[in-house]
Image: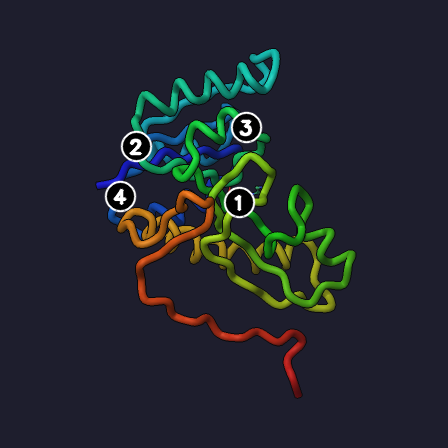
Amino acid sequence: MKKIVVLLSGRGSNLQAILSAKLPCQIVAVISNREDAAGLKIAQAHGISTVVVQHNYYADRASFDAALAKEIDRFTPDVIALTGFMRILTADFVDRYLGKLINIHPSLLPSYTGINTHARVIQDGVKIHGCSVHFVTPTLDAGPIIIQAAVPVLHDDTVETLSCRVLQEEHRIYPQAIHWICREQVWMDAEGRVANNRLEQPGAPLISPGLS
Ligand code: GAR
């Protein structure tokens, strides 16, 4: 069974969704850069080892990432899943785990990389938004995409209502991506593309606002 280490900085709702999906894998540790991350409590309630590596104890990104890698390596994971891990990782760190490191991002990449995605989408008047799971490469939010979900943006949406709609889809696509990787149905190939050996089901089209 594949071993997964989850990295998070906050709430942990994606961790909860991954646990609830009862995937054929074992979450061997949850590591956070913040000791007050609520996700750590979710892990503890499931008997999962937790580790805190506080970024503000380290002089620079390289030394923080080295300490993080040391903790990760203790668990010899097959997959490292970022679920709201709000630290930019160095290229050395990313290269060390290339092909094993995955992330969920709250936008339809390659649009809206970085932070405050929902607010920027509303500001821009975009009609379709969503979330993406991708392999992590050294360029922020630019790695090859495994799966995406799209949601409509409604004219009276606030950051709260829109993020809630997107989050519901995050909780569907992240467990799915991990499931594929654990069953070796999806991987990152030598050219840095997503490869797969499964029968692909086309998703449904989304027109927003709907036709009347
Ligand atoms: C999620 O919305 C995730 O997409 C986002 O942080 C949230 C974590 O929620 N990640 C990023 O913004 C990464 N750039 P959670 O702690 O409830 O899973």
C-alpha separation, residue under disc 1 versus residue under disc 4: 23 Å
3D distance between C-alphas at marks 3 and 1: 13 Å
Ligand 1 resides in the quarter of the picture at: top right
Which dot, 2 or 3, sits closer to the camera?
A: 3
Number of the front mark, 3 or 4: 3
Image point (58%, 65%), residue name: 151
Q: Which residue is mark 1?
A: 143
- Label 2: state its secondary structure: strand
Asked where in the image residue 26 lies, by quadrant, the reply is top left
Residue 114 horizontal side relative to residue 122, left or right: left
- Return the residue at label 2: 28
For disc 4, the marked residue is 25
Q: Amino acid at mark 4?
A: Cys
> Gap between marks 3 and 4, in whole Å?
27 Å
Residue identified by numbered label 3:
91
37 relative to 41 in the view: left or right: right
Which SS class for mark 3? helix
- Residue 110 visible: yes
